Structure formats: structure tokens, C-alpha cells
Amino acid sequence: MAMDRTIYREIKATGGVWSLAILLGAFVAAAMGSVIYVEHHGHIVTGMNNSVVWGLPHVFAIFLIVAASGALNAASIASVFGQAPYKPIARLSAVLAMSLLVGGLAVLVLDLGRPDRLLVAMTTYNFKSIFSWNIYLYTGFLAVVAAYLFVQMSRIDYKYVRIVGTAAFLWRLALTTGTGSIFGWLVARPGYDAAIMAPLFIAMSFSFGLAMFILVLTMLFKLSGRKFGSGLRLRMGNLLALFAAAVLYFTIVQHLTAMYAAEHAGFERFILLEGGHVTFLFWVVQVLIGGILPIALIYLPTIRDSDSEPVWASVFVVIGGLAQVYVIVVGGQLYPMEVFPGYEVTASAFGDGEIASYAPKWSEVVLGLGGVAISLLAVGAAAKFLRILPTNLTEVNVPQD
Amino acid sequence: MARLAAFLVFVLSLAGTAQAGSLLPEIPKATGEAHAEGNEFWRKNHMDMMQHDRDLTLRMGERDIEASLKECFECHAVKDDHGTPVTYSNDKHFCRVCHDYAAVKVDCFMCHRSTPDGVDENAQEGNSHAGLMSRPEGDAGEVAGYLERVKRPARRNMMEAGE
Amino acid sequence: MKFRMPAEKPMDSKQPPAARAQAKKTNKAEMTRRDLLRSGAAVATATLAPGVTLMAFGGSPAEAAAADAGKRWGLLIDVSKCQEDCNGCVQACSEENGWESTGHPETDAQWIRKVTLKNTATGHTQSMPMMCQHCESPPCVDVCPTGASMKRADGIVLVDKHTCIGCRYCMMACPFKARSFVHEPVVNQKSHAPRGQGTVESCTLCVHRVDKGGTPACVEACAAAGHDAIIFGDLKDPNSEISKRLAEYPSVALRPDLNVNPGVRYSNFG
């Protein structure tokens, strides 16, 4: 094993760091304001309703939670798969995984109808519900990754890092499977009842997590004036393209399979063709901007070697990822459930058989962005107070394998 | 030395206020018979008893327990000047009196009605959010109004409430 | 007042220690004359009333009972008797349970609704009420993280609003869109039907009436209007009106492919 020459140092609190912290703090404060507003008036002030019960806050929350488990990948590649070039960034990877999860959970919990009952949710369990399992998976993830970070930062024998790292990797797979199963195990809805939801979410976590990791790593290095060499950047870029392609693959399989079944044909027609803004989000934002464009950016030689890669690819993956989660979460609810197969509903007091409508309000956007801000504040604070960021990531200092 | 003197003055002034009008809550008198177990028992255990009974009623369907919230209001409904029982949004409500003092939020009335059947809760002023606290009485706003009430001399009922 | 006299209730570990200690000390002599008279009146009413109401509306004579696993409450809706322009069941439910429609179905309470269907193959139209189907294997109960969505021993599916955190997962899971979320603060609830902001609600099969031996408000209203389209009864009792009709005439459950075995069935559905 090559000697570890990586020096980890806290980032200095420069003016730039403070400005960013204050900006993120403002977003968090706005989100708190939104929560108080919704709590006081009830969910009637949001765009969510009896048909579209989960909206923008859940889109943000699920994106953050899925990205959280994927953000651990860099550390897993180092510890579990033994790739030396990733070792210097393993600590940040663990911290980012925890931060993103905390941000996502914050949004989820704050949008509950009764967030004051969180203690009830944490002490009363129905273990037939995948939601219940997820509570353990999420909190357990925080514990396991914290342990992982601890062994990484201590002068302990490396084999323990491998053991805890493997446990964290397996846990993160279980977590993402659990998140995908929230949807995959709903028999009632034509857009969800599919086993492929779990592997699709795993692929999404790889892709979104790596994209967020690249963005945060690049940002932290810029803020602290540290050098980020092209070797590691290109490696991560290639990996991102691979993951984005995997997401495209699973998406294709998901929709092809659904189109083949007559009972799901209506839903597929809605998403792929007749869904208005949902169709736009699917083809233009999810597939084109979030899938094909990043892959092209990374593999086209002229763009690939520029200094801005894979940052732009990551930005597009994140945008496409949010759109994908929106199409899954909201699109799946907009399409009416088939309560009376073989019958057309000519009148209903509750919109049976009709495409539902959802118009998100500002309170939801603010809450979602507040969750992102919580994540970024957390990882920034960790970089400021803990030695998780390497001082130098140029070729000289990246361990060669 | 000066600081010690200032501190003593502060403490004594508090004691002085206490004698003028008690800081303890003025518990509204109930109608009907007192509970057999006594006030102290009820103050300590009413939450456990309510939770136990609610599970019996909701999950097991036993409704002949006669210890429902509705039953409580038969004796513990506090009336306003017009003789109408007040809702939870009014700080004279029976539960509010102690719970405001103890600063323990009461969750029940987000879903349960806080007056006996037949009272139109919609008609009560400032009652758009029964689950949330209302402003205390008093013209000069929340804090001043509260201080106003606290300075009133202790009622006879304080003794009868079994203090 | 007959008030949970400790000696009369079976002692169980759920009672607080003080009550159990009290129970050992208290004896029946503490019951006053008033208590005796009241309890007698209560018992008499409880015995007579359910018999009267149930007999009138075709249910089986049930005593005022707690949730009994030997029973399974259900509804049978005769679609051919349901009138398209009649809203009696919906109005009765809203009266009974204290909710109202404000003209915004997307955020209003949805306990029961009328739907009009047209058979795409034959063109036949029909109208019928839709409410919680009180499934035997309710998907909403499976997915609730806190167990607030529950099925009682007698088959009635309820939301325990004390434990509901308002996550709305049960609303995602219900195949019949039977549940709704309370989007605004609520006051002036009926004492027998508490409901509040931030929790999920649905048809309770008028459990507060059923537990006292009564029938749901929608059933009563439909009978009062002369349509008799909905009947209520014990599905496990072969001698109840509902069981006899189910055995004699064809009926369907909605979404039979899901195998949730609803307690609500529809006859003359076509």
C-alpha cells in the first residue's frame, strides 16, 4: 500500500465563505418561515391536495435522500473497491452523505401534517410499512456513516476502515432500495407498481450522488483556493457519464415494460405524450438535459478536456434528476387511478378518472430549497471545523493505483 | 455589595407581588360532584387516564366507559359573560387555565371540540384556530393584558380548588 | 355519576398505579343513589335502542358491543336503486360527521361521494356512492408508518388521529381514493367525530353509531328517502339481511384483481 501523503486541513473562513454561509442561512430562515406559515394555516396554502398529496417538497426531499446515499460512493470506491485515487476525498464523501440525508429528512419531516408528532413517528412503528423501515434505515445510515468517518479520521488500522466502509456501502444500498420501494410497493397506482423502482433508484443514487459530490468538492476547493487537478476530475467525469447512462437504461426499461402492458398504456401515454408540462419535463429536462447532454459533454473530446468539466455535466445531471423525481412523484399522482376498469366516469364529486392538477406554491419551493441549504451549510461547517478536505488534489498528491 | 442589594430588592419585590395577587392559576370551579380520587390524583394522572380510555374506545370500540372528553365538559365547562361555554381559544377555558400556566401544549383540541355539544364554536370571537393560543384578555396587548390579570387579588375559589 | 369506579373495571397493567391502588381500597358502597339510577337508565336505553334502529333498517339485532372479532360489518349497495340526482347519503354523512363541501373537492373532506359511470362496452350508465371500502387486507393499513391507519377486529378501517402524523402515504396507497387530508384548521366538530388539521380521514362506517348498535347515517338517509339502496349488516352472520342478499343475488367488489376483499359490495353493477 502506498504511503498516504494526503494532508487534510480545515478551510479558512474567508469573506467568500461567510457570504455563502449567510446566504444559505437566509434560505434556511425562509424555509422555517414557510413551515410556520403552513403549520398555522394548514396545507390549503400549498399546492398539494387530495389527489396530488406529495409535491415539490417531496421532490426535493427524495432527490436529496437519493443523492445522499450516492454521495457515499466516492468513499466506497476508495475503501470497498480499493481505488487509491479516491482515498483523499473519502472523508468529504462521508460527510456529504450525512449532510444531504439530513437536509432531505428535514424537508420531509417539516412537510408532515403534524410535524409536532415526530416523536410519535420515532417511537410507534408499523413494521409492515416500508416507511417505518425507512426511518430505521435513515437514522442507521447516519450512525454507520458517522462511524465510517470516525475510523477514517483516526489512526486506526486500515482494515477497520474497509470493514466499516463495506457496512456503510451495504447499508446505503438497502436505504436506496427502501426509498424506491416506497413507490414500487404501491399496488394501487399504475405509475408505481413496478419492481424496477428499486434498481432505478439505485442507479439514480449513483448518478445524482456523484454529481452533487463533484459540485460540492469543486465549490469547496474554489472557496478555499486549493488546486483540483484534472486527473481525478476526469476519472469522476467518466464515472458520472457511466452512471447517467445507467439511469437512462433503467428509465428506458421502466417505460418500455410499462408500455407493453395494456393496463399501463394510459399512464405511459400521459407521461410520454399527453402530459403537458410532465411530458416536457420528461423528454427535455430529464432525458435530454439530464441524460444525453452530460454524457455528450463528458465524452466529446473538445469539451472533455476543459477545466469546467465535469462541473457542467454535474449541473445538468442535478437539474435532470430533479425533473426525474418530479415526473415520478408528481406525474405518478396526476394520472388518475383506475378505480372502475372498463367504465368511464361521467360524473364524480372527487375528480375520479380525471387528470389531477397541481400548481406548486412558493411555500413549497422555499421549503425544498431550505433543505438543500441545510445540507450545504452542514457540509460547509464540517469542512470548516473538521479536517475532511485534502489540501491538494493535483496529480502529484493523488495516490496512483 | 451593591449587586447583592439589588438582587435582594428584586426578590422581595416578587414576594410583594405574590401577596398582592397570586401568580398561580385561578382554577375555574367545576359543577357536579368532585372526582372520588381527588384533585391531586387527577392533576397528575389525567393524561394517562385519557390515553388509556381513548385506546379502549377507538381501537376496541368500548364506549360505555363514560370518561370521554364530552363527559368532562358536563362539569368543567367555563361560561363567558353571556352564559355560553368558552372554547379552547379563550384563555378562560378550563384546560387553558392550568396548561397556560404550566406551559404544556394541549393537543386534544386540534381535533376534539372543546365545549359541550350544541355550542356553536364558530360564533366565538377569534376562534378561527381552536388549537392555537389566543391573545390573553387586556386592551394593551398580550404582555400588558397578562400582567393586568395577574395583579388581580386571588379568588376564594383558589382555596376550594383544593390547592 | 358512574365514573370508572375502579372496582368495576378489570384491572390491567394499562391503568396507572394510583388507580390500581385505589381499586383495592374502593368498595361499591361509595356508589350513590344517583349513580344507581343513572346506570340503570343507561343500561335500559342501550338494550332497547339498537334493537329498534336495526330492526327498522334491516340489520341484524346486535347488542351494543365493543369491536367484536366475531362480526364483520359491511355494506351492500344496490346500484339499480341509486338515483343519479340524489345526494342523500352524502348530505347525511356530512351532517352526521361535521364536514362540509366548500366547492373545492381537491381540498375538501372526502368521506363519501357519488359517481356516475358509463360502461364503455355497452353504454349502460349507473350512479352509486363511493366510500372507504373497509377492506379485509387494507393497503392503507399496510403502509402507515405509525399504525394510525388501523383495522378493528370487526373489520372497520379507521384512522387513529392521535397517532396520525399526516404523511399522506395511506392516501397514496388507497386504490379507491377513499381518504382525504384535512387542509385547514377545524372547529365546532361533532363530539362523536373528532377531526382536525393535519390528519387524514375517511368514512368510519359511523363507528360511533355502530358501537352503540346503530347503523351508518348514509344507510338511514337512503332508507328515509325511500330508495333503500344501501344496507348495512354483519357479513359474518349468515342470518343477517346483508348476508342473505349476498348469498342470493350477484354482487361485485371494486377492483377484485387487487384481492383486498372489501367489506362494501355492489349489486346490479353493470
Image: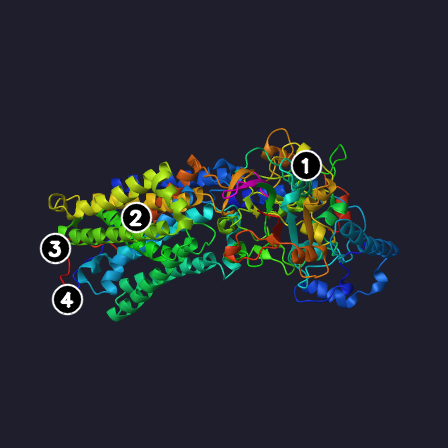
Label number found at residue C244: none
- Amino acid type at circle 3 is Glu
Q: State which region is magenta.
A: C108-124
> What x and y, as percent, mark residue A165?
29, 65
- Amino acid type at circle 4 is Ala
Q: Nearer the viewer, mark 3 or mark 1?
A: 1
Residue situated in front as seen by the camera: C132 or A391: C132
Name the quadrant containing residue C225: top right
Using the rendered image of the protein, determine whether residue C177 is visible from the camera's viewpoint: yes
> What x and y, as percent, mark residue C78?
65, 47
- Amino acid type at circle 2 is Gly
Answer yes or no: do the residues labelled 4 and 1 have beta carbons within 8 Å?
no
The chain that hosts pointer 1 is B
Secondary element type, mark 4: loop
Residue designated by label 3:
A395
What is the crowding at mark 1: few (fewer than 14 residues within 10 Å), some, or many (at least 20)? Answer: many
Secondary element type, mark 2: helix
Secondary element type, mark 3: loop
What is the crowding at mark 3: few (fewer than 14 residues within 10 Å), some, or many (at least 20)? Answer: some
Q: Earlier in the sequence, mark 3 or mark 4?
A: 4
Residue designated by label 1:
B121
Q: Residue furthest front?
A: C122
Q: Earlier in the sequence, mark 2 or mark 4?
A: 4
A55 part of magenta stretch: no
Residue designated by label 4:
A2
The chain that hosts pointer 4 is A
